[in-house]
Image (tube, rainbow, N blue to C red):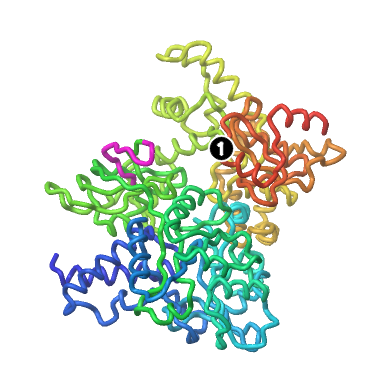
Amino acid sequence: MNIKQRIENLSKELLRHQYLYYIKAEPEISDKEYDRLFDELVALEKKYPEYAFKNSPTKRVGSDLDNVFAEKKHEIPVLSLDKEYTLQGLTKWVKKIISNSERELSFVVEEKIDGASIVLYYKNGVLDSALTRGNGMFGNDVTENIRTIKQIPLITEEKSDFAVRGEIFINKSDFLKYNKSFENKYSNPRNLAAGSLRNLKSSVVAKIPLNFLAYEGFFKNQFCNNHILILLKLKHMGFCINKNIAFFSSNVKDISVVPNEFPEIIKGKIKDISAYIEGKIKGRNKLDYEIDGLVVKINEIDIRENLGHTSHHPRWEIAFKFDSPIAQTVLKNIVIQVGRNGRVTPVAILEPVKIAGSVVSRATLHNQEYIEILELGPGDLVSISKRGDIIPAVEEVIEKSYENPAVYKFQENCPFCGSRLIKQGAHHFCKNKKCPERMKRSLIHFVSKDQMDIDTLGEKTIKFLFERGFVKIIPDIYKFNYDLLLKEEGFKEKRVDNIKKSIDKSKSRPFKKVLAALGFDGLGTSVASELIKNGFNSIDKIIEIASKGEKEEFSKIEGFGTITAELLIEHFTDNKNLELIRELKKWELNFKEKIESETLKIKPFENQIWAITGSFKNFKPRSKAAEKIEQRGGKVNNTISSKTTHLLTGSLSGSKLERARNLNVKIVNEKEFLDMLNLSL
């Protein structure tokens, strides 16, 4: 590929990713991968300016403009940020700024919250309009949606015109709770926050747990030369300000500019910036909101104005981006997985490589488009990261395979059943419900710990039973004569007895678990729980309403909507699904809710919010402890926040324990918890 063609391809690719990120709120690649492509285009255009496009993505900030909402011109420049990924590079930037200044400077370090940027314009102290960042010159008017956010003042005591720039975001704990009701429809808090700003109904936006933090104020009558004092003024005007701010100066006396009303601000000398950032990197996962870096900015306003900005970013501030651990290895192969509902996922098989303390040999490749963006194929030398320090991801191709430089292409047919794969959106699907891989995955899902919890039927055992033809569909789990396994290698009498006991025990699993274990698309534990809470406490009631096609009976349940209602009707009028339910009823599975709390005269955990961490002797899996709490009127969240009242701790407790102690949350061990349960009976 020649230089001109590479510049053209990069330009088109970046413009497409800008659209996916800013308009659709559905990014397909990581920020790091986007930055890599952007930096490559910048370098090529600098070296070969004659090939640069007039409307190159390097000449714009990156736009989130949407033609559904009216466009308005920004009254202030709303630019992106230059980025740095290493402490050495950041230190070099700070030193360069200081060396080019004729006087001593101070710097402010703020968290770079991963949300949606917004600019608020006030006229005579009253909110007049709220614009998305747009392309830096124009933004979409989303004022009606912004008015629903209680943290944003609609009227202030400041009787003048001014602008405030800030971030719309969602706390992780709020996101998990909200997203649970939609069966994990949204991939992360940032996508939900950004997407909600473009919802056509502000009444819907009002129900989304959006937050706002202001980080810049722009006043026509500049009253000070100090960013910290501007933040203080915004605070006095009723705006929420992030308390996690640090101030650094080369002159110790300058630290006195930080007012006593900001006691939480960390203060230090310029040389302390690196140590502060290292601490923030270690502690970022303890925050209840996502941050993808830190922003280092000059405190003095007049110096900012003197430095100005490029067409892309201000020269007086820079983003220090948290970088995932990176390693290099060889992509040995790409294999295809098919889920129980037919979705096809390509998986990278890697030459094992150690990264962030663990050995990585596999990584998801999402879909065909993701593979094509990376131009990926077996034999390539690739870089691997752990996104969020957890999920392995292929980030880029370092060197194409010499022997096989082609990009991997999906085969047309399912590798397990031969059916033609169907593309829907960005993904491929096998639509054959009798596909052996789909059938096997349905069995694995049914017996898993979070569903029917048949722990003696692990994935390997299910595969063995399936391949030998002993268990093909879910009812076979209860029909099969497991004594026949005594003839098979590795199945002794004790193991077979344990299998039979765990299968028999699964019949007492609550209705919501049985319902979710069926594996119907979009019908997980949270949807099952909401159905039961709203009166659908038996399978017969659900089937009866579905048979009448009464969508409104389902859609009126909070968080469901038309799509969920239509799915429920589709599932519970399907003859094969109804036959499956009839077969399982014969084996006495629990298809009616038995609510333990009905036998309790009081709900002792009412108004309590619990979190759970560690391993337990009496509650395997931990969801059994959560059920006990909910039965007694309590709520269970996955994260610790200021609203958490109790933390149930077992052995090998994680970071939740330390955070709970810092927030003075009541710590309850397993013995104390059992005593509390007995007292409530």
| Rendered residue at 78%/32% (across/down) | 676
Q: What is the x, y in percent for residue 551? A: 65, 60
Is residue 452 in view from this perspective? no
Residue 317 falls within the magenta-colored stretch: no
Q: What is the x, y in percent for residue 255? A: 54, 65
Q: What is the x, y in percent for residue 434? A: 43, 41
Residue designated by label 1: 654
Amino acid on which the number 1 mark rests in the picture: Gly
Q: Is residue 642 above or below residue 168?
A: above
- Tell me if 348 is positioned left or right of 248 in this view: left
Q: Quadrant of residue 295?
A: bottom left
Residue 348 falls within the magenta-colored stretch: yes
Front one among 674 and 377: 674
| Rendered residue at 66%/66% (across/down) | 261
Q: Quadrant of the N terminus?
A: bottom left
Front one among 587 and 196: 196
Q: Is residue 573 above or below residue 70?
A: above
- Tell me if 6 is positioned left or right of 436 in this view: left
Front one among 144 and 161: 161
Q: Quadrant of residue 262?
A: bottom right
Query: How many numbered discs, if any?
Result: 1
Q: What is the x, y in percent for residue 319? A: 41, 64
Q: Is residue 9 above or below residue 480?
A: below
Is residue 545 in view from this perspective? yes
Q: Is residue 542 above or below residue 559?
A: above
Q: What's the magenta region?
A: 346-358
| Rendered residue at 63%/25% (across/down) | 617
